[in-house]
Amino acid sequence: VEASIPEPQREAWTKNQFESFKDQGEFEKEVVRHVETTLARSMFNCDETAAYSATALAFRDRLIKDWNKTQQRQTFTDSKRIYYLSLEFLMGRALDNAMLNVKGKDIAKGGLNELGFRIEDIISQENDAALGNGGLGRLAACFLDSMASLNYPAWGYGLRYRYGIFKQEIIDGYQVEVPDYWLDFNPWEFPRHDVTVDIQFYGHVRKSQDENGKTVANWEGGEVVTAVAYDMPIPGYDTPSTNNLRLWSSKAASGEFDFQKFNNGEYESSVADQQRAETISAVLYPNDNLERGKELRLKQQYFWVAASLYDIVRRFKKSKRPWSEFPDQVAIQLNDTHPTLAVVELQRILLDKEGLEWDEAWNIVTATFGYTNHTVLPEALEKWPVGLVQHLLPRHLQIIYDINLFFLQSVEKKFPEDRDMLSRVSIIEESQPKMVRMAYLAIVGSHKVNGVAELHSDLIQTTIFKDFVKIYGADKFTNVTNGITPRRWLHQANPRLSELIASKTGGYDYLKDLTTLNKLEQYVDDKDFRKEWAEIKYANKVRLAKYIKSTLDITVNPAALFDVQVKRIHEYKRQQLNIFGVIYRYLQLKEMSPEERKKQAPRVSIFGGKAAPGYWMAKQIIHLINNVGSVVNKDPDVGDLLKVIYLEDYNVSKAEIIIPASDLSEHISTAGTEASGTSNMKFVLNGGLIIGTCDGANIEITREIGQDNIFLFGTLSEDVEDLRHNHTYGKHSVDSGLQKVFEAITTGKFGDANDFGALVSAVRDHGDYYLVSDDFQSYVDTQKMVDEEYKNQEEWVSKCIRSVARMGFFSSDRCINEYAEEIWNIEPLAV
Ligand code: 4GP
């Protein structure tokens, strides 16, 4: 690698290197310096926002050094890198995480205190980086943390949305969406105005002959938009490794701004072109587990993968290695099908730009990519109209057709008898209009395909991708059960519990090897330990109760059982089952005598989550929960025995307050629909028990922690199809408990019955696709069991401790090591 500074001057550089703060005094100095010089303020007008900015900048300075060194190390060693392509990175806040990862939080706490601030107030000044919808995006963020912590040379690639997921307000019980402009001041991003890529759209393909008489495709004309890189440092925990997350922002290509028009006074229309270009990275599509084929979304996808691949290829070419070594240097993981065009783009680069032959190029492509599937829901499987792809990316469509042709030829050879097979597995669906099936393209273009929990990986192999298992063999398909980073989801969110655990397991090393938690098992019977444990849970509940009071002006009793369901609102996740259960509880309480009521266990039912703006049924569910809350919460018959809370605008930073405060959390999807779930892991790791169905990672959690420590109920996934079939043919009954719930709703107990007609009919009259009626009885029975068990606090706390002790498997570090070994074939880089 060539150095830009000549030998004789290097000493001056080395000698004068910036040293970041080492102790509290130096930290304070850095903060004051940033307040006064970077922010141009003084101690007379340094508010919490300014103190946050200066603190963030002080830590940022520190990260940059490690970040630069990490990048240099990766370049010098020329090691294989993993590129994680994800349209979503649900990062949350960065400052607290940065402080903890570099082990500087105590210094910051003391320093800020001396300067007149409380660290909690400063941390909460930061906007969440909410560039994702839910599980898929948060998983990507946990993976970045693990890849850095484990010293893997890794880059994330995504889009720098100007607007993240909308902010949710609840007004009169309804969800209202407010744009999330989060970039006011973002100290964590570095614009790289020198790292730009011009991306082409539309136009046409012209074939010509090169000097050797070979036919070459020229993609010409159309529109060009420029991608600008913005980099974010991703610090590892207790290691200098600091990786890079590169997010692309779109702007008009230079020369796009039409000066002629401008000079002619057509200022508006000249600016319009600019705005059109900027629209590409303007907003995150707010759908979770749902794809809607919008042209702008396809543009986003291509814009992002083309820029990322250009960058990756440019980096590879610097090494001057032959193309055949590309897969030895580069692994690319497709986070769901959103980046699948990368497969086609790499093939195009190798064919059209680099002049490789088809087979040679295709072998490189398939050896490079891996594809992770995150859902089996049919409405989430991505398909694009052929006409749209043709229009936007004419050359790519040709390549897709060729990929499909060669693929189908090989299938035909292998299964000459099965004519039907060809149309079943074709990348092009012969529908009206014809569609490109992105999941099939991703499978054909990758060497490994994985699901995200055992049941889910089995299901994809036996249902939606069954034919591909026949074609490629089972080896191409694998499972990597999801995980979560214990740094954010225990140490940061629940500092007191983390400290207690550290005191018993031999320090904070458990944050690097989560299986060390098993040392806690020996303290299960230790009364003092249990007491301390319970006190911490109580304190976390008090913290949440205060939050509820301050935001909703509702008083909840921290001694009540906190029952939490926070996640995206979706029929398959079945918040409707939960709220029907709450109504059932309420009706029962109303029927009881005051003496009977005294024997009941008090409960706070806490909900949170966003509905996709266009998902009407999900919005009805939110409305019903809120209306039930406004009736129940002021009913004097019920008092503290039941409160129903809807927490507005659930996001990562709120999850960090809510999760540590839960006694019981709900993961109650219809069996076979939740690919994995990751909040289930977070709740258990924070000492809460869960009520759940035999779905996703609940199954593996049960296997790890033992079935006595989890409340399972409901239909098994293998029975779902039969039940659905029965419903369709009218063999479907709603038992009396649920009938009563429906009666209460339809007689207007919770506001205008018309508002909830569809919600009730979906279960009662329209086939009950999500099996709410089938599972209702076992759900309420299981909740009864929860009430009983919660009364025995000693036993309850023992279960919590035992569960935490057995959660080691669910670290995202384990997960990343599995990907590295099984899919990426990549080693950590020694530091
Ligand atoms: C989610 C799945 O619904 C969830 O079960 C899983 O834990 C998560 O991915 C991470 O693997 N899928 C999505 C989506 O968010 O949009 O498909």
Image (cartoon, rainbow, N blue to C red):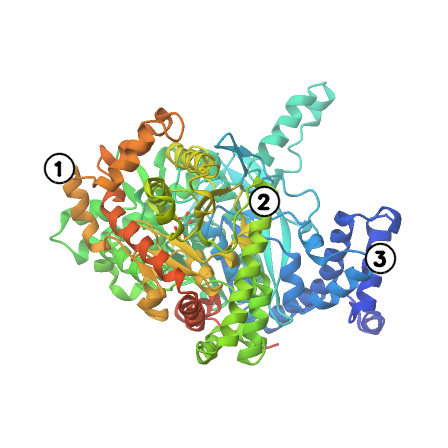
Residue located 32% across and 62% down the image = 699
Residue located 68% across and 56% down the image = 120
Q: Is residue 64 above or below residue 379?
A: below
Residue located 43% across and 38% down the image = 632
Residue 300, percent from left and from top: 50, 41
Q: Mark 2: which amino acid?
A: Lys
Q: Are marks 3 and 2 in contact (CB under 8 Å)?
A: no
Q: Secondary structure at mark 3?
A: helix
Task: Give the residue at the far top of this rendering.
Answer: 265
Q: Are marks 3 and 1 in contact (CB under 8 Å)?
A: no
Is residue 456 something that shows in the picture? yes
Marks 3 and 2: which is nearer the front? 2
Residue 403, percent from left and from top: 33, 50
When asked about the image quadrant of residue 726, the answer is top left
Rounded to the nearest angstrom, the CA distance separating label 1 from label 2 is 48 Å
Residue 123, percent from left and from top: 68, 54
Circle 3 sits on which residue? 32
Q: Earlier in the sequence, mark 3 or mark 1?
A: 3
Q: Secondary structure at mark 1?
A: loop
Q: Earlier in the sequence, mark 1 or mark 2?
A: 2
Q: Secondary structure at mark 2?
A: helix
Instruction: Give 137 or 382, whichever is nearer the viewer.
Output: 137
Circle 1 sits on which residue? 729
Q: Mark 3: which amino acid?
A: Val
Q: Please state if 813 lies on the left or on the right of 65 as rendered.
A: left
